[in-house]
C-alpha cells in the first residue's frame, strides 16, 4: 500500500487489483456462494426441524417429553452451537476453512441420525447437542467465506443471499414435518437430516476453494495467488492473513478489543444475543405458542413455513438496503419492526390476517440478525474476520440457548402467550445495541489518530 494513498476499507486487500481478464463480480464468485448456500440450507433445515415436529414429539408417549424438557433440549442444541461457534473461528485459521466446514456438516448429520434412533429423551437430547456442535461452526464459517470472496461493495447483499438458504431450509423442514410426521412419524423427518452428509459434504470437499488468506498464512503463497486469480480477488497481502500458531490465535481474540473496536465488540455481541434469542426462540416455539393461542395443529405448524418464507424476502430486501444505507441502520430498524410484529402476534386475529402478520414479521425478524453479521464485517478487518464473526455468533448463541429455554419455561407454566411479549422485548434490546455501534466506534478510537468509519458502515 502506498504511504500517500488512503487505507483500504476493512474486509478488502491492500494488494494490487485482480489480474486483468477476471473481474471481481458476483458471477466470478457464484460457485463459492452456491456451495455455501447449500451448506446453510441444510443448517436451516436441521435447526427448524425440531420446531416443525415439536407437537408430535410432545404427543409421543414413548419419549415422555414435557414442554419444560423440550425447552431444555432446545437449549442443549444451542449450547452445542455456542461451543461450535466459539471454537470454529480460531480452528479454521489453523486448519483451514474447508476441512472444518465439512466436519461441521458431518457432525450435525450424525446428530440427526442419533435423534432418529432415540427411544427416550436423554439420547435424543445428546443427538441435538451433537448436531449443535456442527451447526454452530457452520454459520460463521460460511459467512466468513462468502464475505471474503464477495465484492466488498456488495457484502451485505451477498450475506442476505446466503441467508435466504437458511429460510429455504426452514421451509423444507416444515414441509417434511407436515408431510412425514403425521403418517410415518417424526423419526423419518430426522432421518432426512442425514442427507447433508451424503449430498453437501462431498461437494464441499471437492469444489469449495480454500481461503487465500489462510493459504498465505500457512506459507502456500502460490496456491493463495492461484485461488485469488481464479475468482477475480486481489491477491492476499500479509495483512489479510490470519495470525498463525497458538499465540497468533490468542492475538486474534485480543484484537477484538483493540482501539477503534473495543467498545463496538460487546455491542455486537449483545445485538447478536438478542437476534439469536428471537431466531431460535421463534423457530422452536412458534407452532406451540400459536396452538396455545387457539389455532389448529396444522395451521400452527404452517405458520413456521410462512415466517421462513417471509425471511427469504427479508434477506433480499435487507441486503440491498444495507448496501445503500449501511447494515447498522437497517438492522436497528428491522429489530424495532420485529418487536411490533411479535406484539401483534400475541393478539387473537382472524386466521387470514394472522398469516399476513406472521409473514411480515418474518421479513424483519431473521434479517435483523443477519445485518448484525454484515455490520461486524465492516467493523473487523480481513485478518480478524473469521475470529470476529465466530465470537459475534458464538456469544450470540447464549441468546439461542435462552430463547428455547424461555419458551419452554413459559409453556410449562401455562403462559405460552407471554412468549410474544418476551420476544418483542428482545427486539427492542437488539435495536438499542446495534444502534449504538457507530457511537462506540467513534468514541473508542485513539484521540491522536482519528479516522472516519468506512463508507456505509453506519
Image: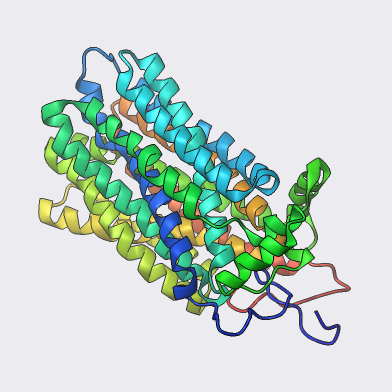
| Residue 34 % position (x, y) | 41, 60
Q: How is the image coloured?
A: rainbow
| 52 left or right of 74 in image | left
The extreme bottom residue here reads 4
Name the image quarter holding the N terminus. bottom right
The image quadrant of residue 82 is: top right
| Residue 302 % position (x, y) | 18, 45
Q: Nearer the viewer, residue 411 or 228?
A: 228
Name the image quarter holding the C terminus. bottom right
Say if 242 sits above or below 95 in the image.
below
| 116 left or right of 245 in image | left
| Residue 75 % position (x, y) | 45, 30
At 75% across and 52% down in the image, what residue appears? 218
The image quadrant of residue 59 is: top left
At 78% across and 64% down in the image, what residue appears? 238
At 47% across and 27% down in the image, what residue appears? 129
Q: Is residue 76 visible in this depiction of the protein? A: no
At 33% across and 38% down in the image, what residue appears? 195
Q: Is residue 206 visible in this depiction of the protein? A: yes
Q: Nearer the viewer, residue 126 or 191?
A: 191
Amino acid at each position: 500500500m502506498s504511504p500517500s494513498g488512503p487505507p483500504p476499507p476493512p474486509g478488502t486487500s491492500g494488494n494490487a487489483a485482480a489480474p486483468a481478464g477476471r473481474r471481481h463480480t458476483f458471477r466470478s464468485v457464484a460457485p463459492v456462494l452456491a456451495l455455501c448456500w447449500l451448506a446453510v440450507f441444510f443448517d436451516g433445515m436441521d435447526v427448524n426441524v425440531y420446531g416443525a415436529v415439536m407437537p408430535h414429539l410432545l404427543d409421543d408417549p414413548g419419549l415422555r417429553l414435557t414442554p419444560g424438557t423440550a425447552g431444555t433440549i432446545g437449549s442443549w442444541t444451542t449450547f452445542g452451537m455456542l461451543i461450535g461457534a466459539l471454537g470454529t473461528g480460531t480452528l479454521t485459521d489453523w486448519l483451514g476453512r474447508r476441512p472444518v466446514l465439512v466436519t461441521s456438516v458431518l457432525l450435525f448429520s450424525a446428530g440427526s441420525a442419533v435423534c432418529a434412533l432415540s427411544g427416550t429423551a436423554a439420547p435424543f437430547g445428546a443427538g441435538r447437542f451433537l448436531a449443535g456442535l456442527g451447526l454452530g461452526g457452520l454459520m460463521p464459517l460460511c459467512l466468513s467465506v462468502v464475505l471474503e470472496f464477495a465484492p466488498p461493495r456488495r457484502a451485505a447483499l451477498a450475506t442476505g443471499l446466503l441467508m435466504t438458504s437458511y429460510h429455504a431450509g426452514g421451509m423444507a423442514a416444515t414441509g417434511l414435518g407436515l408431510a412425514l410426521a403425521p403418517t410415518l412419524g417424526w423419526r423419518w423427518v430426522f432421518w432426512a437430516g442425514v442427507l447433508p452428509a451424503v449430498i453437501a459434504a462431498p461437494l464441499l470437499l471437492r469444489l469449495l476453494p480454500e481461503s487465500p488468506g489462510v493459504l498465505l498464512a500457512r506459507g502456500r503463497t502460490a496456491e493463495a495467488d492461484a485461488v485469488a486469480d481464479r475468482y477475480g480477488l486481489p491477491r492476499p497481502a500479509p495483512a489479510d492473513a490470519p495470525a498463525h500458531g497458538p499465540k497468533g490465535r490468542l492475538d486474534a481474540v485480543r484484537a477484538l478489543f483493540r482501539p477503534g473496536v473495543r467498545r463496538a465488540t460487546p455491542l455486537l455481541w449483545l445485538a447478536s444475543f438478542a437476534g439469536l434469542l428471537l431466531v431460535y426462540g421463534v423457530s422452536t416455539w412458534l407452532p406451540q405458542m400459536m396452538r396455545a393461542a387457539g389455532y389448529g395443529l396444522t395451521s400452527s405448524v404452517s405458520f413456521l413455513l410462512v415466517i421462513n418464507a417471509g425471511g427469504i424476502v427479508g434477506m433480499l430486501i435487507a441486503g440491498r438496503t444495507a448496501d445503500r444505507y449501511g447494515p447498522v441502520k437497517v438492522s436497528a430498524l428491522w429489530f424495532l419492526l420485529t418487536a411490533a410484529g411479535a406484539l401483534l402476534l400475541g393478539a387473537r386475529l382472524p386466521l387470514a390476517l394472522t398469516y399476513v402478520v406472521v409473514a411480515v414479521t418474518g421479513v424483519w425478524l431473521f434479517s435483523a440478525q443477519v445485518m448484525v453479521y454484515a455490520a461486524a464485517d465492516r467493523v473487523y478487518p480481513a485478518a480478524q474476520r473469521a475470529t470476529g464473526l465466530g465470537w459475534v455468533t458464538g456469544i450470540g448463541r447464549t441468546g439461542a440457548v435462552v430463547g428455547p429455554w424461555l419458551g419452554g419455561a413459559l409453556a410449562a407454566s401455562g403462559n405460552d402467550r407471554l412468549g410474544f411479549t418476551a420476544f418483542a422485548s428482545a427486539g427492542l434490546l437488539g435495536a438499542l445495541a446495534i444502534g449504538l455501534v457507530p457511537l462506540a466506534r467513534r468514541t473508542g478510537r485513539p484521540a491522536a489518530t482519528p479516522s472516519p468509519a468506512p463508507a456505509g458502515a453506519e
